[in-house]
Image (tube, rainbow, N blue to C red):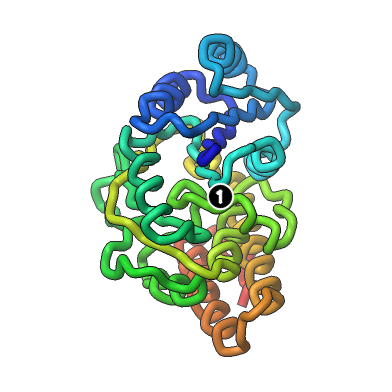
Amino acid sequence: MLFSVIVPCYNNAGFLRNCLNSILAQDSSDFEIVAIDDGSTDGTSQILDEYAAKYDCVHVYHFANSGVAIARKRGLNLELGDYVIFVDSDDTINPNLLSELKVTLSTHNYPDIVRYQANLVNDAPHKDHQRYNFTQNLNVNSGIDALKLWSIEGKKYAVYWLFAFKASIFSKVPVFPKFRCYEDVALIPLLIAASSRVVTIDYVGYNYTCNNSNSLTNLDTFEDIAKRANYFYKAYSFAVDHMGKLDGISISNSSFFVTDYTRRLRGMYDSLPEELKAQFEDWF
């Protein structure tokens, strides 16, 4: 099997059918869906079981709530494909994504990572709607060169849903940190840097829902913001601590990454409400 599409699910019954239908609508059939129910209480579990009973390619696993990082890790332990794609349960993918990836993999002799482009659904008007996209250089690059190319102020790359990963690449990085959020900030740069070959394609394959009020990243009480800030700092520290330990990463490349990620940490700090900044002054 070429692709495993891992869908971590927690209380997203209102979005889930659209998500699963978009995967099932792919024009390539060489895939499975690995849906991890992370202790949902809103009908998500029943929807997943309905799809598993109807479609042989849908595999559903129910667990007690442990957070999205653990859900993704469980999906990786259960998947069977050569390549892994992560789709959040409130998002969708476009119908040609897997066929576009299949052609890309064959053309480029099966690289470690393929990056594609994203459409941001209901994004805030004042934001850069292309902040997750990169189309300037579509050549094959080493992982560390790709990381340098993508380290652009104002742009983001550290999210699981932008990539197809060769399943074996996960064995080259540390065990998933047990974070409730921002474990992608911790691990994505390490996965990229550990890769021998990375390809970027200009196909817009992913639709990211920006305004899901249930998303942890959209909860906006001071307590929620402070929790997210703490997790971001933990993710930053994890990535910085482990980058220099990867095989083949030079001191200069590690230093480049630390500088870039420290800039991103400063951006997180600057975005905090003034009432909270005093709690996090020891970051710097």
> Where in the figure is residue 101, as x and y percent of width and height?
39, 47
For this view, does 106 lie left or right of residue 47? left
Residue for badge 1: 225
Quadrant of the drawing holding the N terminus: top right
Looking at the rendered structure, the kind of residue marked 1 is Ile
Residue 210 in sight? no
At 57% across and 54% down in the image, what residue appears?
184
Residue that appears at 57% across and 17% down: 48
Residue 72, placed above or below residue 109: above
Percent x, y of residue 255: 57, 85
Looking at the picture, tell me which residue is in the foreground, 265 or 81: 81
Looking at the picture, how far across and down is residue 113, in whole percent?
A: 49, 58
* Residue at 61%, 23% in the rendered image: 59
Q: Please, what secondary structure does the residue beneath circle 1 have?
A: helix
Q: Residue furthest bottom?
A: 252
- Give how far across and how far down residue 272 sits, in percent: 50, 59
Image quadrant assignment for residue 33? top right
Q: Residue 107, can we see it? A: yes
